Amino acid sequence: MEPLTAGAIAIGTVIATKAVEKTGEKVGETLWNKTGEFLVTLKKHSPHTVVAIEKAPSQPLDYGKAVLEVESAAKANPEVDQAVQELVVAAKADPKIASKVKQLETNINSQPATVINNTKLAEEIKNVFQGNTIIGGTF
């Protein structure tokens, strides 16, 4: 999986996990644990990114910038890369999140590989994980 896609899914999964928990539902224990491990690992290498992710959705998040920072941290540190990959696997296995992860992955992979439009990427993450699908309860 492309690092950019994995980073986007990881960030989206953290946000989606928080959104699902907010509605009173529970995500699977594995996904919950992997989300926490990802944030702890990323915090060692990019604390400002974790702070920004944790404040979303109550405060606007620059998704494009956050994805690039996660991608950069993953490239520079195998521990972060492993945490991202494990979170992606856990997200794809969790029935409450899996369909949204697949939708985001499809949307990102359908973009031309040579041109990554951060604004479009940010919109995709926001639409998939924060749009009416989660808030409206049709998740």
Image: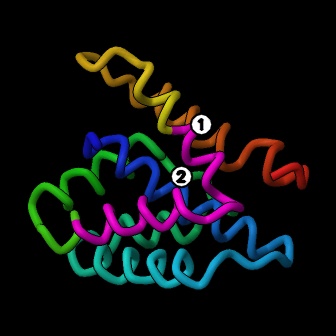
Magenta extent: 82-104
Q: Is residue 38 left or right of residue 57?
A: left
Q: Is residue 60 left or right of residue 22?
A: left
Give the residue drawn at x 31%, y 41%: 4
The answer to whether 118 is drawn above or below residue 95 in the figure is above
* Residue 96 percent location from the top left of the image: 71, 61
The quadrant where residue 20 appears: bottom right
The quadrant where residue 70 appears: bottom left
The answer to whether 109 is drawn above or below residue 17 in the figure is above
Rounded to the nearest whole Å, what is the CA distance between mark 2 and mark 1?
Answer: 20 Å
Give the residue drawn at x 66%, y 70%: 18
* Residue 118 percent location from the top left of the image: 40, 30
Q: For residue 94: magenta?
A: yes
Label 2 SS:
loop
Identify the disc placed on residue 61. Answer: 2
* Residue 61 percent location from the top left of the image: 53, 52
Identify the disc placed on residue 81. Answer: none
Identify the disc placed on residue 103. Answer: 1
Q: For residue 133: magenta?
A: no
Could you tell me the amino acid type at mark 2? Leu
Give the residue drawn at x 69%, y 63%: 58
Quick one: 7 or 51, which is closer to the camera?
7
Q: How is the image coloured?
A: rainbow
